[in-house]
Image (tube, grey):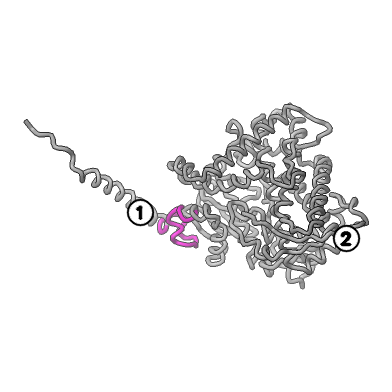
Amino acid sequence: MAVQLPPSPYSFAAGTAASVGLVLLYCVSRGIYNAFFHPLRHFPGPKLWSTTFLFRHVAAMRGQLDWSIKAFHDKYGDVVRFSPDELSFSSEQAWKDIYGHRDVPLVKDPGWYSIVKGPGGAQSIFNAGPQSHPRMRKQLSHAFSEKALRDQEDYVKTYVELLIHKLRDVASAGAPADMVKWYNFTTFDMIGDLALGKTFGCLKDSQYHTWVSNIFNSIKIGPFIRTMAAYTDVQSLMRLLAPASVKEARRKHELYVEVHAKERMDKGIMEERKDFISYILKHREDKNSLTDNEIAANCGFLILAGSETTATALSGLTYHLLKVPDCLHKVTEEVRSAFSSEEEINFLNANARLPYTMACISEGLRMYPPGPSLLPRRTPSGGASIIDGCQVPGWTLVGVHALTTTRKPANFHKPNTFIPERWLPSSTADPSSPFYHDRRGASQPFSTGPRNCLGKSLAYNEMRVILAKLLWNFDLELCSESKDWDNQLTYTLWEKRPLMCRLHDVRKGE
């Protein structure tokens, strides 16, 4: 009788080695194809990064991708290939070609944006596809009309007055103020009241609401989501690799928005509260109205888009003003000479009387764009698209890299220097001005085209009024520990550090 021998202890090892060898062979061959035979092979960029997505994803998860892309542009030029199928552009024309109105529009990358879901899997205007986006934008636009903007001024006024009151207490105590914190308190309280009918109480309590703190943590999951989109076969692994605190922050964020948005919707239209939801609910009988889950999903997006970005812009602007005393002096003098009393500082007057202040805001947005990354789009799959004169193959991921484009010498004279004068009408009209040839359209902090930011007018009004009231009441001084404040990592948005300033109350005793 034949004896059944046990399996060789070497057979499993041999099989495993063979499998590993096949995987390595595939990876090497794929990398060679991507680098030397891929349709994008002719575009400049770091050759190693073109072989695999690994390098761009590791850089993103470490918060260094945007600085890497900027360095690549500095080395390789206007367009850079920074992964097997991604191109970054850095010109004014690219904004129009990628995000502008086109016969065949470039779509948001579905593999990335579709992963982020609201209640019941609902999409928001942030990730709505080309079929749903026009419907959502039309419904949400009611909350951002000129009439709505006038109604929203009372919300802004309430929280800005509370901000000034709190800062006066800080100044009296002689303690430095973290302006990142105070700007975030203000914008989150405002947008929470507008979007959910519920303030977070950050200003009142002089501390972050737990949910607001969770938002900052949840932002960091963005690079993990992008990696999951690229490697659909390892999404479960990426979910495991994402830090537990970050995943929990995302879960709490989604739950909080769902509960409180539906709680606000249950109250219906409230004539005494002209918030976002009141305007949206007035059109519930429209044929293409939003569902409850879509309203909740959009509330979640509007809270982030309408708070974090505005606070970021104000933080960056404050830092750069304090680094350039001449500009700080000019804008302070303009504010204090434009009004006879603080009560005159409102949306209408701030817009009409503060041209240099507006130039400072525009320059702050250029130097420190709240969204430093590129907004990814896919070229149509049916054929090549022309972007900034380049023929780009179909279904390529493309975008304008904001951090690079706004700091590019070809776009702006002295691009790394904070000079608000470049935005004044005199600079655009006078051919002898060193800024006459600046390509101002290269700075698009609110994007452009059919998907540009709905809240642009509200954001500008908030920034003008907040900055004007701050400068009306206080002289500011940058603390030494914040002298290199803008040296930050990015996770789609900036990872802001405390911006420590000393405030001197110039209205004390009045």
Q: Amino acid at mark 2?
A: Arg
Q: Nearer the viewer, mark 1 or mark 2?
A: 2
Q: Position of residue 158 (x, y in %)?
A: 82, 44
Using the image, determine if residue 167 lies above or below residue 485: above
Q: Residues within 10 Å of mark 2 (few under 14, many from 20)?
A: some
Q: Which residue is mark 2?
A: 336
Q: Is residue 42 left or right of residue 139?
A: left
The C terminus: image quadrant: bottom right
| Residue extending farthest front | 173
Q: Position of residue 225 (x, y in %)?
A: 53, 45
Q: Is residue 37 magenta?
A: yes
Labels 1 and 2: the sequence-earlier one = 1
Q: Is residue 113 magenta?
A: no
Q: Which residue is mark 1?
A: 29
Q: Position of residue 195 (x, y in %)?
A: 73, 38
Badge 1 marks a residue whose secondary structure is helix
**Residue 2 in view (yes/no):** yes
Taking depth in this image into account, of 104 and 376 the one nearest to the observer is: 376
Q: Position of residue 307 (x, y in %)?
A: 70, 46
Query: Within the image, what quadrant is residue 358 found in?
Result: bottom right
| Residue extending farthest bottom | 432
The N terminus: image quadrant: top left
**Residue 141 in view (yes/no):** no
Residue range of the region highlighted in magenta in the rendering = 35-56
Residue drawn at x 33%, y 52% is 24
| Res 212 label | none
Q: Is residue 40 left or right of residue 431?
A: left
